[in-house]
Image (cartoon, rainbow, N blue to C red):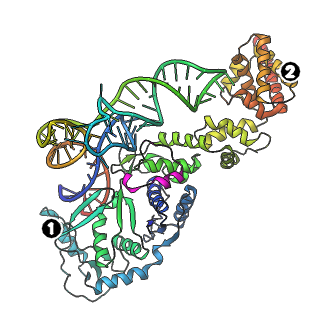
Amino acid sequence: MIVTRFPPSPTGHLHLGGARTALFNWLYARHTKGKFILRIEDTDTARSTQASVEAILESLKWLGIDWDEGPYFQSKRLPIYQEHIRKLLDSGHAYLCDCPPKRLERIRREALASGRKPKYDGKCRDRGLNPSDETVVRFKTPLAGSTVLADVVKGTIVFENSELDDFIIARQDDTPTYNFVVVVDDITMGVNVILRGDDHVMNTPKQILIYKALGADLPVFGHVPMVLGSDRSRLSKRHGAMSVLAYRDKGYLPEALINYLARLGWSYGDQEVFTTKELIEKFSLEKLGKSPGVFNPEKLLSLNAEHIKRTPPKILAQRLLPFLARRGVPVEGADLEAVVASLIPRSKTLVEMADGALFFYTDKVVYEESAARKFLKPENAPILKQVSARLERLPAFEEEALEDAFKGIMAQTGLKLGKIAQPVRVALTGKTASPGIFEILEILGKARTLERLRRAVEYIDAHAAQSVDENST
RNA sequence: GGUCCCAUCGUCUAGUGGCCCAGGACGCCGGCCUCUCACGCCGGAAACACGGGUUCGAGUCCCGUUGGGACCA
């Protein structure tokens, strides 16, 4: 069985790059009916916070990335690491070293000065020291030969062991170091497929050596290229809102973000739009790309619009509720599902949709200044009155009947639909842009429509009077 | 500086030696539709980093150069 994992450090929010790594591992586990493990790498106690842990879990949940095991916390696994350090010491794959920092610093400087690569010289390799407060544990890296990484996305990469040195796996205070901890975790958790950012490539030979020293089978490694910002540098806060939760709050659908992230560095022919279910079906390691990709917010936005179009109004209505609530809008009167349906083609985010829905639920429409100036003027008052009168007589407020009513007015007045619809639109919505006029009419219903028309006429009269005043003075 | 990785339209990418004077998507431009705004539809500009090989034939294989990135220092 395939076992994958996602091991975030709880030192901040889950950002897009991390989310994509999690996604690839999760997709692969789900695709193969394997297991996906969540592991919190909180050994850096100074920078790790509980708030970050919660933010990460919340982000994953929102995205719909669920885990079968965990979350494990590295901070609670110290005894396991120590046990494995013992093993390496006993088997002669590691040794104790008490070289003081001063000496280490000196070799480093000398190496640099003579143009060599700075590395530990192996002085304590065979000294057989006893453990003390002064000793660290070093891994006994082979002096010659090479270590081969058979990477599923990058291909085979060969590292000369002579490039590596006897790196520390446990510090003086007995705490294990990163490369060691990761390997022990992955071995003990049964992880056999590791998909991660290619910033880890250089760690991999060390880790492979540890696997071998521990006598464990190597997992499949796949190093995916990182996500870059528009300036082609590694994605960071500088490039705007990077946290997954920020996208949730900006009104993105989780399936849109997943779709975007999956397609950034992975492809399936010409297909651009995927449901999460489809991604699980179609995901494959072979189609992972090996060149870094630039994050493109516009494409994400258009994908979000696409997913909005593909989501049933009923479900969108549910998801829109929190956004409406945040605006203090009581969802009463107009049928939210119908409102949502009318806004689907013109909303790229749920935020836009919520904004577009506002006028349906406010009794006192606020007129945009330029809209009022252009359409709520005296010459349009008769039109509004005529529309009112005609609609008053309408038994049912349904699109077809409404359209007939407007046609009647057109015939009577000789006006084009636009001349009538625009003032009505401003009267009903306060804006010059909105869903179709008949659609709005039907959703609003007779009572509220007539009320809004009446208020618009009132507004025109008041302003006409006002401008007369201004003229006379 | 050392080691490693990468290289097709502005961006994400298809392309695994002939199907490619390079396809799709986002964005951009033009048009159509139209009660506004959108949606939708039609069309357009836009790329194989460069130089050498290999081959009858290279975006596709090899080498080098250049550029970008990662890690370590």
Q: Give the residue pinned by disc 2.
A: A389
Look at label 2 and name its amino acid. Answer: Ala
Residues under numbered marks 1 and 2 in contact, where contact means CB atoms less than 8 Å apart: no
Q: Which of the 4 quarters of the picture holds residue A346?
A: top right
Dot 1 falls on a residue whose secondary structure is helix
Q: Nearer the viewer, residue A264 or A71?
A: A264
Dot 2 falls on a residue whose secondary structure is helix
Disc 1 to disc 2, C-alpha distance: 95 Å
Residue A216 % position (x, y): 33, 76
- Residue A110 is tagged as 1
Look at label 1 and name its amino acid. Answer: Glu
Q: Residue at x 87, y 25 (%)?
A: A392
Crowd tier of the residue under label 1, counting other residues whose Cα lies within 10 Å: few below 14, some 14–19, many 20 or above: few
Q: Quadrant of the C terminus of chain A?
A: top right
Residue A121 % position (x, y): 17, 74
Q: Nearer the viewer, residue A92 or A242?
A: A92
Task: Left or right? Give the position of B54 relative to A90.
Answer: left
Which of label 1 and label 2 is nearer to you?
2
Tally the numbered discs. Answer: 2
Does the segment drawn in magenta span residue A220? no
Extent of the magenta region: A270-288
User: Vertically, is A83 above or below A350?
Assistant: below
Task: Left or right? Give the position of A195 relative to A461.
Answer: left
Crowd tier of the residue under label 2, counting other residues whose Cα lies within 10 Å: few below 14, some 14–19, many 20 or above: few
